[in-house]
Amino acid sequence: MQDPRIRLVTTILLSAAAWISLPGAFLAVLWWLICGKARTSIRTIRSFFIILIVPGVMGLAAVWSGKDGLSYVVRIMAVLIIASWMYAERYPGELLDVGVWFLGTKTGFDLGLIGELSMSSLDTLARETDRISIALRQKGTSLSPRIIPAVFSGILIRQLNLAQERAILLTLRGYTRGGMHCPSFSSPGIDRINGAFSCTIFILSLIAGDFFNIAGSTFIV
């Protein structure tokens, strides 16, 4: 999908549809398979299972409390799939483009810049994690619960230092608020069709999930 505006709205609609109801989750995954061409930023099955650790624990807690934990896990999996698709489709600077287009060169520029810095931090985090994995394999050591705190505290400290360096750099360049930016977009017909399909899925999920019955089976309370 070339138009980041349509992609952002599509991601929001499909994620909401997947969370609202099980039919919405299945339809969102179906959209991903057909329209998203099954693209994902999750490269390995191991990474996918690591990402699912927290939702899995919360699902088990829901089952323990008498709620539908399986439904929760399925819907979270669908949301993660859609999020990984968006991350794989993005290009550097698209959040800045969308922010300026939607909210102008002041508020939109600031929010877009924050989004780009956040995504850049995620990229850095992924690279740091890969380097740590390679270093551990070279030393013949596996990632165990004993060394996880040390590993992730090191990553956190690195991210904080990097954020401080970026803040200093922006200050030295005279950044205060807003900025000039002229985004341009390409909106092919297939993007609009896929976006319309996601709108249909969202509406169907509202109907299937009984959206207004918050205390029902749609949400875990």
Image (cartoon, rainbow, N blue to C red):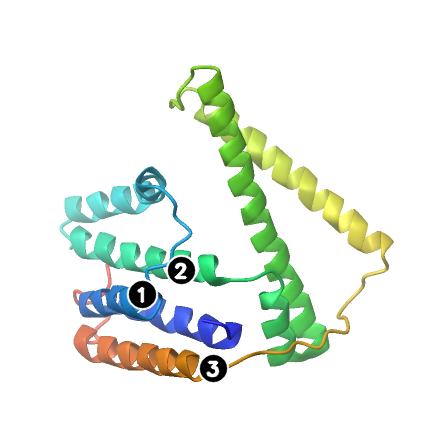
Asked if residue 212 shows in the view, the reply is: no
**Extreme residue toward the top, this view:** 140
- Where is residue 172 shown, x and y percent of the image? 86, 52
Task: Judge whether 134 appears above or below 102 on screen.
Answer: above
Give, as a three-letter code, the residue at label 1.
Answer: Trp
Give the labeled residue for mark 1: 32
Q: Looking at the picture, which amino acid does disc 2 mark?
A: Trp
Sequence-first tag of 2 and 1: 1
Quadrant that contains the N terminus = bottom left
| C-alpha gap between disc 3 and disc 2 | 19 Å
In terms of sequence position, does the residue under pointer 1 or pointer 3 come before the other? 1
Quickly name the residue at label 2. Answer: 85
Q: Nearer the viewer, mark 1 or mark 3?
A: 3
Is there any visible trace of residue 57 in the rendered image?
A: yes
Say if mark 3 contacts mark 2, CB within 8 Å: no
Identify the residue under disc 3: 188
Residue visible at 31% across and 80% down in the picture: 197
Q: Secondary structure at mark 3?
A: loop
For discs 3 and 2, the disc positioned in front in the rendered view: 3
